[in-house]
Amino acid sequence: MEKSIEINGSNEYKLPHMKKDASIANLSSFSVECDATSYESALMHLNNRLTEEVHFEAMVNSQEQVI
């Protein structure tokens, strides 16, 4: 997940080697960790995307009112 976040959600990345034999003993206590820089970058990217979506939606709605 962190690799996907680092490249802004794209799925064009290679997964790092994972220990296939390893298992999670207690799934309820398992938590995913992420680098703080990657996390902050992802939040900024998502915020930018949401701002773009609002802008595009406003443009579409304004054109619908003209028609």
Image (cartoon, rainbow, N blue to C red):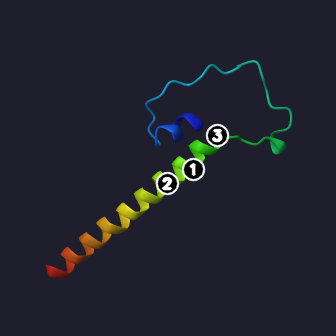
Mark 2 and mark 1 in contact? Answer it, CB < 8 Å. yes
Q: Earlier in the sequence, mark 2 or mark 3?
A: 3
Give the quadrant of residue 37. top right
Residue 31 placement (x, y as % from top left)? 76, 43
Of the pair 49 and 18, the residue shown nearer to us:
49
Q: Which residue is painted at 57% across and 50% down in the image?
A: 40
Q: Residue furthest front?
A: 37
Mark 1 falls on what kind of element?
Answer: helix
* Residue type pointed to by label 3: Asp
Q: Count the marks: how many?
A: 3
Position of 17 with respect to 21 (left or right) is left
Mark 2 falls on what kind of element?
Answer: helix
* Residue type pointed to by label 1: Glu
Q: Which mark is residue 35?
A: 3
Give the residue pinned by disc 1. 40
Residue 66 placement (x, y as % from top left)? 15, 80
* Residue type pointed to by label 2: Met
Give the residue pinned by disc 2. 44
Q: Which residue is painted at 79% across and 26% down in the image?
A: 23
Q: Which residue is painted at 44% across and 38% down in the image?
A: 10
> Crowding at label 3, few (<14), some or many (≥20) Cα neighbours within 10 Å?
few
Of the pair 37 and 47, the residue shown nearer to us:
37
Give the quadrant of residue 53. bottom left
> Crowding at label 1, few (<14), some or many (≥20) Cα neighbours within 10 Å?
few
Residue 29 placement (x, y as % from top left)? 84, 43
